[in-house]
Image (cartoon, helix red, strand yellow):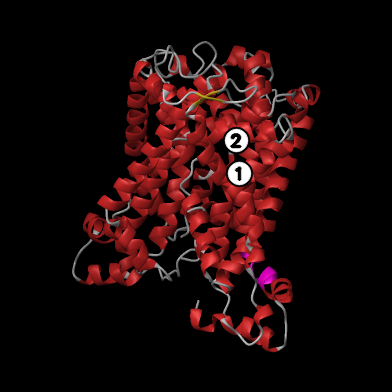
Amino acid sequence: MSIQMLDRPRVQHGHSSPSARQRQRWNWPAGIAAAIWLVIVAVPVYYIVITGFRTQESYIDAGPLDLPRDLTLGNFADLWDLGFPTFLFNSLVVAFGTVLLVLAVALPAAYAIVRTPNRTIRAAFTMFLLGLAVPAQAVIVPIYLIITRLHMYDTLTAIILPTAAFSLPIAIVVLTSSLRDIPGELYEAMTVDGATAGRIFGRLVLPLARPGLTSVGIFVGLGAWNGFLFPLVLTQSEEQRVLPLGLWNFQNQYGTNVPGLMAAVVLSAVPVLALYLFGRRHLLSGLAAGFGK
Amino acid sequence: MTTAKAFGPNKSARPGVIWAAPAVVFFAAFGILPVLAVVYLSFTKWNGLGDPVWTGMSNWAALGDDTELFGSAGRTVLLTIVSWLLQTPLALLIGVWAAGPQRSRAVLSSLFFLPLLLSTAAIAVTFVALLDPNFGLAEKIGDGNFLGDPDRALYVIAFIIAWQFVPFHTLLYQSATRQIPRSLYEAAALDGATGLRQFLSITLPQLRNTIIASSVLMLVGSLTYFEMILLTTNGGPGTATRVLPLHMYIKGFVGFDMGYASALAVLLVVLGTALSIVVVRSTGYHRMTSDREGA
């Protein structure tokens, strides 16, 4: 199954065809489930967005699910003084750092796996396949040991390295399957022209792997952006704090300031939401790529 | 991919082992080494500072005296089962529904997928605020203290986790449903099969692989559920929501008994892997995946 296909709707037949009508008929139980779930999803989302723009007084007086009125940007201004620009910057560094590191090592590896299937490289591929099953949660103690021994505790690098390592198996599996879609004739043609492996990589693999790279990049980036456990265990100071930790800390320190907290949640979701609006297909296929093959 | 062509006229046109080396070395250091290290650490005493000291089987012997061990293991199993029962039918129904060609469904689906964009931390703080017994929604939809009631807290957490993960599994079912050959439905329609009959005899069997894959992902993913618990109840009230991974985290990073936490971690890895293998073997999924190879 190629990942590019995942979010592409099926070939649409005319709605008048008998099968189309019949398929719609059995859909009512699913339709009811969908309607109920829609409400369950919509209420908290509405709550987050509206509350983030409300004042604390209005939240306490009018209750959590009031209609939007007397909206304010004050909560966002307050976040400025609570260090959130730093947290936002740190999260961006972690997300981009992780994505760049993963793509930089995963694509050459996938290229070698597809083009040079000798025993060593097959063994490496098997290692990555087995790596898919290793849960990061279960190895936080040794990760903590390794990071402190490398004198990287409480740095953004400490978050990036293990996050990237645990994204690597899925990145390699997905990139390998997308490189397999490149026709062998294209490699042969360049080889006949005397191109080296490096030149083929730059001229052929890199351009043709772009959709796969985008999907993997988004999947890995989202995971790094939203990651909580590695930052929690591997950093400590406010200077190195990322957004998810910032949210938790905000809740622990100013738990009663719910509008401020929801403004922070909105802030943490805005970059991802922008990505969703502009590249919905890439984002969803990126997420499904985690499952693709 | 053809192995016969593996040795072309110009050998340098093939990427050598060196191309895979950075990925292998990096993953060995931060993915494989920790797995070996956690086994080693389970035989040591270490408080997080200084050096681990070899103590043999003492951590493993201590498992027998851990009064929280069986409770938290039981809650882990309960949470996993409740989550599966809650998420699988919902994701399956919504995914099949969202796979329909109608424009309105595509629009609504993009709403369904919104929780995918939020981090565990964002979802946790939102539900804690929303379910706050004093200022939240809680007093309007029941008798208040959802996360503070030891009898209900774990089920409330299962609901929050479903809110977070149903969209992902819906996405899997949606894309799998779209790949069911339309001719199957047309043939069934000619035979007079409609409605529920088509769903049971075509859609469901065709989604078998997806159901298994999604279930395995849930099973393995249930280890990550503990982040949500850490962020919402921290295992409380009392120990009502303390699951095994959280127990491990608390022993290691709150109690600074890293050796004992490592023994629990080894237990987790073994249990998780064994369960996945059982599910995959008992459903014959490993044979089916090899059938699909190259598809």
Residue B13 vs A55, above or below: the answer is: below
Frontmost residue, A203 versus B281: B281
Residue in view at x 36 percent, y 65 percent: B290
Which chain does the residue under circle 2 lie in? A
Frontmost residue, B194 versus B226: B226
How many residues crowd mark 2 within 10 Å: few (<14), some (14–19), many (20+)?
many
Q: CA distance from mark 1 to mark 2?
A: 7 Å
Which chain does the residue under circle 1 lie in? B
How many residues crowd mark 1 within 10 Å: few (<14), some (14–19), many (20+)?
many
Residue B281 vs B233, above or below: the answer is: below
Give x and y (percent) for residue B117.
58, 41
Give x and y (percent) for residue A84.
75, 28
Residue in view at x 54 percent, y 27 percent: B124
Q: Which residue position holds label 2?
A: A143
Q: Which type of secondary structure does the marked residue at label 1 adopt?
A: helix
Res A52 visible: no
Give x and y (percent) for residue B13.
67, 79
Q: Are marks 1 and 2 in contact (CB under 8 Å)?
A: yes
| Quarter of the figure with residue A143 | top right
| Quarter of the figure with residue B152 | top left
Residue in view at x 40 percent, y 19 percent: B62
Left or right: where A90 falls relative to B145: right
Specify the segment rendered in magenta: A205-211
Residue A156 vs B45, above or below: the answer is: below
Q: Which mark is residue A90?
A: none
Q: Which residue position holds label 1?
A: B30
Residue under disc 1 on the same chain as residue under disc 2: no
Was residue A208 drawn as part of the magenta stretch in this picture?
Answer: yes
Frontmost residue, B39 versus B3: B39
Identity, as a three-letter code, of the amino acid under mark 1: Phe
Identity, as a three-letter code, of the amino acid under mark 2: Ile
